[in-house]
Image: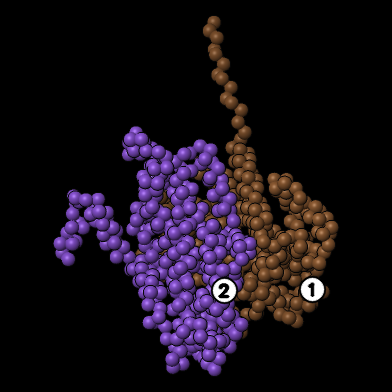
Amino acid sequence: MATMTEWLRDPSPSSRLQARLGQSYLAWLRMRRNPLAMVGLFIILLLLAMAAFAPWLATHDPLTQNLGQRLLPPGTPGHWLGTDDFGRDIWSRIVYGSRITLYIVTLVAVTAPLLGLMIGTVAGYFGGWVDQVLMRITDIFLAFPRLILALALVAVLGPGIENAVLAIALTAWPPYARVARAETLTVRTSDYIAAVRLQGAGSGRIIWGHVMPMCLPSVIIRVTLDMAGVILIAAGLGFLGLGVQPPTPEWGLMISSGRKFLFEQWWVATMPGLAIFIVSLGFNLLGDGLRDVLDPRSSGK
Amino acid sequence: MTVVPDTPAPPFRLPRPIRLIGGTALSLAITILGLLLVTFIIGRVVPIDPVLAIIGERATTEQYEATRIALGLDEPMWKQFAIYVGDAVQGDLGQSLRTRREVSEDIIRYFPATLELATIATLFGVLVGVPAGVLAATRPGTWVDQIVRIVGLMGYSMPVFWLGLLALLIFYGILGWVGGPGRLDAGFSMMFELDVPQRTGMILIDTALAGEWAMFRNALSHIVLPSAVLGYTSMAYISRMTRSFMMNELGQEYITTARVKGMPEWRVVWVHALKNVMVPLITVIALSYAYLLEGSVLTETIFAWPGLGSYITDALFAADMPAVLGGTVVVGVVFVTLNMASDLLYRLVDPRAR
């Protein structure tokens, strides 16, 4: 172990991999000092574990109805978070719901930044009218309040998990394009880009292989910070009945089904909301910490 | 005699404020045009046939064709878009399939309720958020700072519809401190519709103007909860931004000078520093006001608040696309305008932002 840290801390790394891992190790050390960020990381690891081990963690099948056991309060033996109006175990539904949340978050986290990166780097690299047109489009999408645009898109596409993801991704890309463009403008005139160009590389190759990697760190921070928002919008769509369809155990949908008997059986709506809250808090804490660590401009404030 | 060469006349330039306003107006117009293009495209790919939606399934082919031509659907796409933009500019957003009224008429009817809610929510956000941010900035790293930060992060992380349900459960269901969903108790609703002249559509103002104080108090007890729920998110945003602006300001030299001269600390912070933070803060407040329009969609659903958000979601479930898209356009336009107006204000007022 000691040799491992020594290898990571080596001031003159012998390979690119060692240098990269060494950098990440230093960032990790800095982040470890930030207790809130560690709490966030812990929550997200918990979410991942929950999704991975759902069949073992759940005490019941999330879909099987048992009308004899409907609306049992929390603390009932065998149903420690209670049951919903169809007698389904709320804990088991929350556990399986983590998979849905993770599915949506992952898909958005892959598609939206990729789209934003492509638009932003192309705009920044070529400049001129390409930049003008692409950034104007970005501004227009940025001008829509996200939830409202997502609502209108889902209204057209029809409800469902894939369409919800598509709608969220289509509303989430503009900030990434902005970030990527700003980064591209700073590296565009670098010597190493000129060197690659003189070696005969085409624009596509320069953007994909040499500009985009430089934009990744700032985009990744943005993604982490945005994930909480994505979870909230996805839950909002589910709550309005426009996302995942019943009987799938999606957290937002579970809240809306518990709304009917909020005053009598409060736990049906409260428990899944708590899950959404904790997970998005986790992403916010981690994103905040990551920004402090990886972005030297904001550190010290 | 030497001829003094004329100094070349400087090229004619409009004064800066006019250039700024002109530039902003131009980019506002372009953005709104783009906004309309997006809603136009969404409206055209929608699988619902607008002709059938109006005339019904049992119409004859002739009727169908006549309506199709009347709606201008036989024209080429670019011309349809031109007509759409022309209509929208004149305030014609089409007819709602659900209420059978003009969408713009509906929106005028529903918008004041949202405006009232968002205004009170912003007021709440400012009155709590600004002092909290200032307190945190003057005591960085202390428990006050940590609490403000955590309360703020919680505001970012809570689903607003869940918070609304919880608030309703606790303050209305259990404690009974406030009014429930809706703008008034059932008993007052009828009276409001019949007896109170609706000058502004904003219930607090209308009842106050009519001198109906019992009704005013009832309306107040109904608006407290949704506006606090809605305002929580903007409070989180405002306190965070206030903190970072103040931190920046308190590091300036003039602050040190004021302190060295023996000015009391409260005066340094609340008068000198806060005054300079005011301008960027106003842009932040305008932005958060715009974001409230978005939050209002879910909040209004929870609290049965008859505003624009409820209008859009109700229209959504009735597959009433003209109403959905009309509402989207209006929200988008208000959002963009607030955004650009705050940016313009900032650049006009603050000489440093040149």
**Quadrant (top left, top right, bottom left, bottom right) of the N terminus of chain A:** bottom left
Q: What element carries label 2?
A: loop
Query: Dot 1, crowdedness within 10 Å: few (<14), some or many (≥20)?
Result: few
> Outermost residue toward the front?
B61
Which residue is under mark 1? Answer: B193
Residue A44 image position (x, y, % from top left): 38, 70
Which amino acid, by three-letter code, is at mark 2? Gln
Q: On what subunit does the disc labeled 1 rest?
A: B
Residue at the image point whose x is 55% and y is 87% from the top: A86
Residue A231 image position (x, y, % from top left): 49, 67
Q: In the figure, is residue A22 to the left or right of A246?
A: left
Specify the colour of chain B: brown
> Outermost residue toward the left?
A3
Front one among B308 and B224: B308
Q: Distance between the residues labelled 1 and 2?
A: 38 Å
The answer to whether A74 is drawn above or below residue A193 in the figure is: below
